[in-house]
Image (cartoon, rainbow, N blue to C red):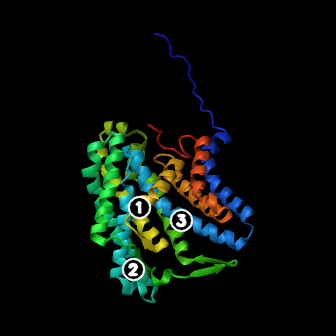
Amino acid sequence: MTAAPEHAPTFTRAGLGQRITPWLPAFLVPLIILAGFVLIGSVSSWLTLTVAGLAMGMMLFVMASGMTLVFGLMDVINFGHGAFISVGAFVGVTVLLWLAPLAAAGSVALNLTAMGAAILGAMLATGAMGWAFERVVVRPVYGAHLKQILVTMGGLIVAEQLIYVIWGPQEIYILRPEALKGAVTFLGAAIEKYRLVAVGIGLVLFLAMRLVLTRTRIGLLVRAGVENGEMVRALGYRIDRVFIGVFMAGSALAGLGGVMWALYAQLITAHMGNELMVTVFIVVIIGGLGSVEGCFLGALMVALTQNYVAFLAPKLALVSTIALMVVILMWRPQGMMPVVKAR
C-alpha cells in the first residue's frame, strides 16, 4: 500500500480588477448624470430632468422587474406583460375614483389611504389575472418560444378588448391625490411631489426585492431556479409552485407599475401597456436576463438618457433608447448583469 501523495491546495485571490469588473455597470448611472450636468449647463434644468428621469426609471423598473424574473426562471417570452400594466392602471384608477372624497381631502393620511387602496386593488387584480394567464395561456406552451410569442400576444389583444368592454373605449383623465399635487422648489428647480414619491417607492421596492432574493429561503430557490432549474428540480423541490408564485408576483408588479404610470401621465388608455412594452423589453435586455440589479440599472439609464436627449436634441429622443441598447450590447452581448445566458 503506497502513501497518498502530499497535496496542499491553494486558493488564488482574485485581483482588484477581476472583482470590480462585474460591477462596472453600476458606475454608468452616475456617469450619465454627470454627463447630463456638463452638457445641460443650467443647474435647475438639470435637476428637474434628473429627478424626472429617476422617477420614470423607477416606474420602468417596477414594470420590468417581474418580467425579467419570469424570463429568467421560466424561459417564457411574455408579450402579454403589457396587459397587466393596463389592467393594473384601470383597476387602480377605478378604486381611486371610488375613494375620490379621500383622495380630494386635505389630510395626507386620507390621501395616502386612497392611494394605498388603489395600489393594493391593482396588485391583487393583476396577481389573480397572472395566475389565470399562466394556467390557461402560458402553461401549454412551455419550452416553445414561437408559440409563446403568438399566444401571449393574443392574450394581450384579448385583455385590451376586455378593457374596452368593461371601461369603454374613451381615454380616462385622472387627478392625483391632493397631497401629491404641486411641486417643491430646490436650487431654483420645480420638482413635482409625485416624482419624489415615485423615486421613493421604486427604491423601497428594489431594496425589498434584494432582501427577499438574497436573505430568504424562497429567494434562494428563485435565484437557483433562474440559474439552473433542472438542478433545483432534481434536488426534490417543487419548482412548478415557484414558477406560479413568481409569475403572479411579476404580474402584480406590472399592475403596480401601471398605477404609478397612470398617476404620472394622468391619462390611461387600453393600449398603454402595449405602448410601454418596447421600452420594458429594452430595459430587460440591457440589464441582462433574470437580473433584478441589471434591470434596476438599465431602467435608470434608459430613462435618464431619454430625458437628457429629449432636452438637448429633441429629434434624437426617439432613437436614444435604441442607441443605448446597441452600445451596451456591443460592450456586453449578454446584457450588463446576466444571471442566465441567452438560450
The spot of residue 228 in percent (x, y) is 40, 39
| Mark 1 and mark 3 residues within 8 Å of each other at the beta carbon | no
Q: Residue at x 54, y 16 (%)?
A: 5
| Mark 2 and mark 3 residues within 8 Å of each other at the beta carbon | no
Q: Earlier in the sequence, mark 2 or mark 3?
A: 3
The spot of residue 275 in percent (x, y) is 45, 60
Q: Mark 2 falls on what kind of element? A: helix
Rendered image quadrant of residue 257: bottom left
Residue type, numbered disc 2: Thr
Q: Quadrant of the N terminus?
A: top left
Left or right of 2? Residue 22 is right
Q: Residue at x 28, y 61 (%)?
A: 128
Is residue 111 depicted above or below 167 in this figure? below
Q: Earlier in the sequence, mark 1 or mark 2?
A: 2
Q: Nearer the viewer, residue 267 or 59?
A: 267
Residue type, numbered disc 1: Gly
Q: Which residue is mark 1?
A: 273
Is residue 337 depicted above or below 102 in this figure? above
Q: Mark 1 falls on what kind of element? A: helix
Q: Which residue is mark 3?
A: 56
Distance of mark 1 from mark 3, alpha carbons? 15 Å
The spot of residue 111 in percent (x, y) is 43, 82
